[in-house]
Amino acid sequence: MEKDKCIACSSDLVKTFPWIVPRLEGVKTVNGEWKIQNKVKTNDYVTVFKVTAINSSLTGYMKAEYTEHKSNVLEMEVYILNQLERHTNFCTLQAYDTSEDIRYIVTGPVGKSLREVMHQLPGKHFTNGTILRIGIQCVDAIAALHYIGYVHRNITPDNLIIDVDMANAQIVRIWHFVTARRHVDENGEIRKPRSKLRCRGDYNYASVAVQEGRDSGRVDDLWSLMYTLSEFYNGKLPWRGHCSAHVLRWKQFISMQRLFRNAPYEIGFIIAHLSDLKYQDEPNYDWIIGMFETAMQRCNISHEKQFDWQQLNCSHK
């Protein structure tokens, strides 16, 4: 097999420009094991590719960074996925290796993001039954992530994906942990909050506190989830397309009744609970899940009901 072709990147270049990530233009295979299908995204941390295994039908997402980087982004993601390997709402780590001058991981199998699915629906938004069950699964997954000592810091519709396997299409998975951070110290105590910070994730879904430059706590992941669910109800957030400063003003003054005008009233109780929490506080995950369950019962929604995307049969990329 022809030797893998990787982008040449000198040590000096990476040291001078530490934000450089491998783009792999012209690269067809990595390590003789993975065939690159297409590039999904490139950001400040890693490049993401959709790949298939050369010797099997396995598909997944590959994230790559230069080995010269001192970053621990991929190492951290490997640790998180290994810790959560028994939890169904996270992807499976399929590979962690180096090839030439890059270090990479492959996770999967993965299907469409919930943003992609939503845009394929006739009304460009999800139904109440689908959203409430997404909420239940995501709160349970976020609680598991927090339990091992990490906050995600970028819960968005793009980072929630459905399973590629139609038999398991009722599973929503959280992925993409490049912005995650350990929120406890070596003794398991909550780390002291920092200040004057830059928002590391998508500011459209960040909490007010995070947009104001404060440190991300456990509650902030849940605020991001609630903004995500609001978008699922309405098709888009009212501040979409505005700059960060304008988005912050929107969040500071918009009423929750407007933001969740199509949602059951139990959502308001969840919002009230989150509003009472500060950086160091632990959310009542079980109670929040109970509120979603109560809304489902009151609205006569069964867990066995098909999700919106199952009716579209669109979970394959």
Image: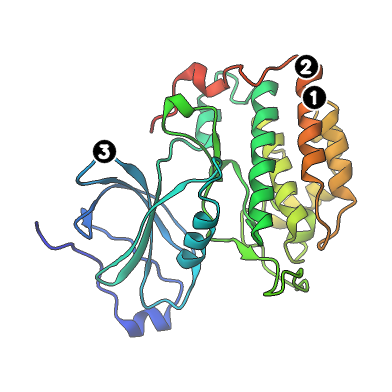
SS type, badge 3 = loop
Residue at image position (19%, 45%) is 55
Q: Disc 2 versus disc 1: distance between alpha carbons?
A: 6 Å
Residue 249 against residue 230 in the figure, above or below: below
Q: Amino acid at mark 2?
A: Cys
Q: Nearer the viewer, residue 280 or 159?
A: 280
Coloration mode: rainbow
Q: Amino acid at mark 3?
A: Ser
Residue at image position (77%, 44%) is 285
Q: Which mark is residue 57?
A: 3
Which residue in the structure is indicated by mark 2?
A: 299
Q: Amino acid at mark 1?
A: Ala
SS type, badge 2 = loop
Residue 310 against residue 289 in the figure, above or below: above
SS type, badge 1 = helix
Image quadrant where residue 297 sits: top right
Residue 316 against residue 93 in the figure, above or below: above
